[in-house]
Image: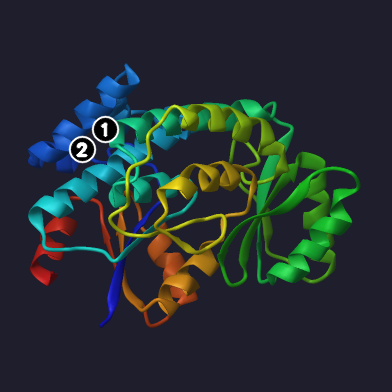
């Protein structure tokens, strides 16, 4: 029996206008955006539908915006199509969307938490002192060796294992720059800084992890309907007691996306449906597993196509 997974995008997939099409056409999506506005006490729906790129790029805005747009898609898909998933997974922030999908987190708790998470991650490191870079064509163990050589007492380490030969590193500006130079000297010419506002998923995020832990302490985690593949260990989790520790660990640990997709493939997942803005994860899954059947749903056209193919 082939299985399917719902996968949820992380930061970088946002765009102005996301979710508007669904909110205009489906009451269930409209209600979800209203719930987000109420939970946060400001007009997140307006930010998603017509916010500037600059506003949407602020981490404290990006995280609740993408989560809300993704769960709006999920609600419409559940209402309008027969699509169901055996597993859920998300990239970084997307893990929160996956946890809402699994029933572990209520939407209101999740949207408030990721708003705080975005703020904490932004405030953990003064602007301009940390950065991230993508290094292409290099394997993980080689890159870890490059990072060790580049650190010189500062932080630099792999942050996202996105797909084979596409790994992102994070750390202090100087250490990341050294890692790029070492990588290029070793023949890995494709190395570029990313337009991010902070060095996510590395040891510099420890203050954010500590603050997030306090926020999560106040939240109730429910039993899960389907397992969620956690970023921190790339393994399926169905134990609600492990949800909070895994989310805290995730802040300072690399996102094991390639390993997560390989784990789902080993569990029999052949179909991956990306719910939310953009097609970034579909692209990564295709690189990791050439045989995977892929779909992304982010608007009315995608919902209708999914309904016909369900």
Residue 67, image x, y percentages:
35, 40
Residue 140, image x, y percentages:
69, 68
Q: Is residue 153 above or below residue 82?
A: above
Q: Which residue is mark 1?
A: 49
Q: Are marks 1 and 2 in contact (CB under 8 Å)?
A: yes
Query: What residue is at 22 percent from the left and 27 percent from the top?
Result: 35
Closer to us: 145 or 230: 230
Q: Quadrant of the N terminus?
A: bottom left
Q: Is residue 10 above or below residue 206?
A: below
Query: What residue is at 48 percent from the left and 32 percent from the top?
Result: 216
Q: Is residue 238 visible?
A: yes
Q: Would you call the spot at circle 2 few (<14 residues within 10 Å), some (14-19), or many (20 or more)?
A: many
Q: Which residue is mark 2?
A: 20
Dot placed on the residue nearer the N-terminal end, 1 or 2: 2
Residue 171, image x, y percentages:
73, 44
SS type, badge 1:
helix
Q: Is residue 12 visible?
A: no
Q: Is residue 264 above or below residue 173?
A: below
């Amino acid at each position: 029996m082939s299985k399917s997974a719902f996968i949820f995008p992380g930061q970088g997939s946002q765009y102005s206008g996301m979710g508007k099409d669904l909110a205009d056409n489906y009451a269930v999506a409209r209600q979800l955006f209203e719930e987000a506005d109420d939970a946060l006490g400001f007009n997140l729906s307006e930010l998603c539908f017509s916010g500037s790129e600059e506003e949407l790029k602020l981490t404290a805005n990006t995280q609740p915006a993408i989560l809300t747009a993704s769960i709006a898609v999920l609600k419409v898909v559940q209402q309008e199509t027969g699509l169901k998933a055996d597993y859920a997974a998300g990239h970084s922030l997307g893990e929160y969307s996956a946890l809402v999908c699994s029933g572990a987190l209520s939407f209101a708790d999740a949207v408030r938490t990721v708003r705080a998470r975005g703020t904490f991650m932004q405030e953990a490191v003064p602007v301009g002192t940390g950065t991230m870079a993508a290094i292409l064509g290099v394997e993980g163990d080689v890159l870890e060796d490059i990072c060790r050589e580049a650190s010189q007492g500062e932080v630099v380490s792999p942050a996202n294992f996105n797909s084979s030969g596409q790994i992102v590193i994070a750390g202090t500006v100087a250490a990341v720059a050294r890692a790029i130079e070492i990588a290029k000297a070793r023949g890995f010419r494709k190395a570029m800084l990313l337009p991010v506002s902070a060095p996510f998923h590395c040891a510099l995020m420890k203050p954010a992890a500590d603050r997030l832990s306090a926020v999560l302490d106040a939240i109730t985690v429910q039993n899960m309907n389907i397992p969620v593949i956690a970023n921190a260990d790339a393994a399926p989790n169905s134990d609600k007691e492990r949800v909070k520790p895994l989310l805290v660990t995730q802040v300072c640990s690399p996102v094991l996306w390639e390993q997560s997709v390989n784990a789902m493939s080993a569990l029999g997942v052949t179909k991956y449906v990306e719910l939310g803005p953009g097609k970034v994860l579909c692209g990564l899954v295709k690189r990791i597993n050439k045989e995977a059947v892929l779909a992304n749903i982010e608007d009315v056209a995608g919902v209708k196509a999914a309904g016909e193919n369900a």
